[in-house]
Amino acid sequence: MTRAFPGIRTSNGSKPSEPAQTGGEPAMNLERRRDELSARLAELQWDLGGLAYEMATRDRMRVDLIVRQAAAMQDVDAELSEIERIMALEKTAVAGLCPNCKAPHSSGAAYCWQCGHPILHQVDPASIFSDV
């Protein structure tokens, strides 16, 4: 776990707000990704507490750093919540990955929750009736 507050990076070296890159079968990766995000969220909470403590002991609060760390936590928490929602729906719906950013999505999702990329592709109506 890193404790270098100015750079605000996770233990794997990525920025906390960067989207996760998952591969392979989405259903098998969701549980692993949820565990990674839970650990990362705990680490970010720890870092935020340490950051606030260090600033308080030096009597110099930098709100911009606190807000940036809190925003990173919100990003991780949003992805974690979406994965938990998908895992709950997995019993009745099939999940997949966004073709653009590789964020997980539930079946029936029209747009990616993270990047807004369309997930459903429109079919040309002429192609439907051309085979009839």
Image: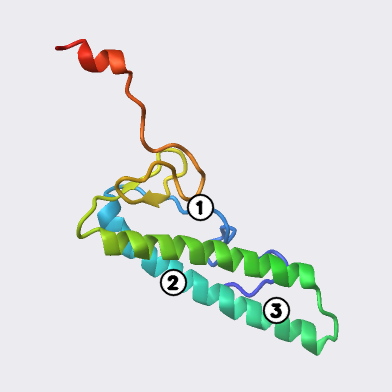
Instruction: Identify the residue under disc 2.
Output: 38
Q: Quadrant of residue 17?
A: bottom right
Is the Cβ of the residue at disc 1 closer than 8 Å to that at disc 3? no
Type of amino acid under label 1: Pro
Q: Report how far apart the C-alphas of labels 2 and 3 lie in the structure.
A: 20 Å
* Disc number placed over residue 102 in the picture, else none: none
Q: How is the image coloured?
A: rainbow
* SS at mark 1 in the image: loop
Type of amino acid under label 3: Leu
**Within 10 angstroms of label 3, few (less than 14), some, or many (20 or more) residues?**
many
Q: Which of 64 and 1 is in front in this view?
A: 64
- Quadrant holding the C terminus: top left
Position of residue 99 measured from the top left corner of the image (x, y, whole percent): 40, 38
- Quadrant holding the N terminus: bottom right
Q: Earlier in the sequence, mark 1 or mark 3?
A: 1
Q: Which of marks 2 and 3 is nearer the N terminus?
A: 2
* Disc number placed over residue 51 in the picture, else none: 3
**Within 10 angstroms of label 2, few (less than 14), some, or many (20 or more) residues?**
some
Type of amino acid under label 2: Ser
